[in-house]
Image: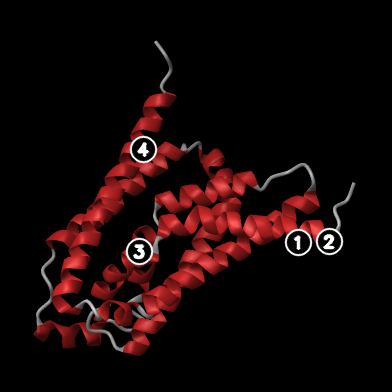
Amino acid sequence: MELTLLALLAVAGKSLLFAIAAILPIINPLATAPIFVAWTQGMGSDERNHLALTVGRYVTLLLASTMVLGSLVLDLFGISLPVVRVAGGIIVAYNAWLMLNTQEPAHDDSSQMAQTLTRQNARPDTFYPLSFPITCGPGSLAAAIAVGASLRTPRITETLASLAGALAGIVIVGTVVALTYRYATALLRKLGDVGQLVFLRLMAFLLLAVGVQIVWDGIRGLIVSLPAT
């Protein structure tokens, strides 16, 4: 029995809300906004806005491709989800540790950073590590894989409607990331220089804790998967 158009729209809307609810709280762009501000220090507003848009685009593409192809790729290469969590968690924790111990750049360094951070040569850093794994980490990718797996149904039309709704939800998530990063400086300006530095260190510590938690979840999953003796 084929579903009506109204029923398909309802399925798509449910999948849209499900994707947003499952992924956006994990990404939490407000928590990484101070990191983006510190990363783009010395850049002009146009370059920073372009970088924010690029990060949002990368996050959207990464989440969408992971949701559609993630489970298939893992099965193809025989890679388990706990292994992905351990590797990704180590990267997240390492970047957080560097942020905790990096001193604030001196004023004289700002002009040099402004000259070197341009649209062309900042692009590699835009994907790694800013888009992945700082903004979109293994926890977000694991959630995207879980969302993609839940979209499969015996009915092709229902599966396609669910997929379309989830993809629309991911586009919304990427848009929220881009807008949050674009206006991050204005959002954090009220904190002042000292407040931003303290908030950055706090978020870096929380990011370190998230990385350790992801590693532990992966280790725990590996332990559970061990054969009983």
Q: Please, what secondary structure does the residue beneath circle 1 have?
A: helix
Mark 4, mark 2: which one is toward the viewer?
A: 2
Labelled pair 1, 3 in contact (Cβ < 8 Å):
no
- The answer to which of marks 4 and 1 sits earlier in the sequence is 1
- The answer to which of marks 2 and 3 sits earlier in the sequence is 2
Percent of width and height locating residue 38: 23, 73
Labelled pair 1, 2 in contact (Cβ < 8 Å):
yes
Amino acid type, callout 3:
Tyr
Q: CA distance from mark 4 to mark 1?
A: 36 Å
Q: Residue at x 39, y 10 (%)?
A: 229
Q: Picture quarter containing residue 190? A: bottom left
Amino acid type, callout 2:
Leu
Name the residue tied to disc 2.
Answer: 5
Is the residue marked by circle 3 packed among few (<14), some (14-19), or many (20+) residues within 10 Å?
Answer: few
Q: Please, what secondary structure does the residue beneath circle 2 have?
A: helix
Name the residue tied to disc 4.
Answer: 217
Mark 1, mark 3: which one is toward the viewer?
A: 1
Q: Residue at x 52, y 52 (%)?
A: 144
Name the residue tied to disc 1.
Answer: 9
Residue 119 in view in this figure: no
Name the residue tied to disc 3.
Answer: 128
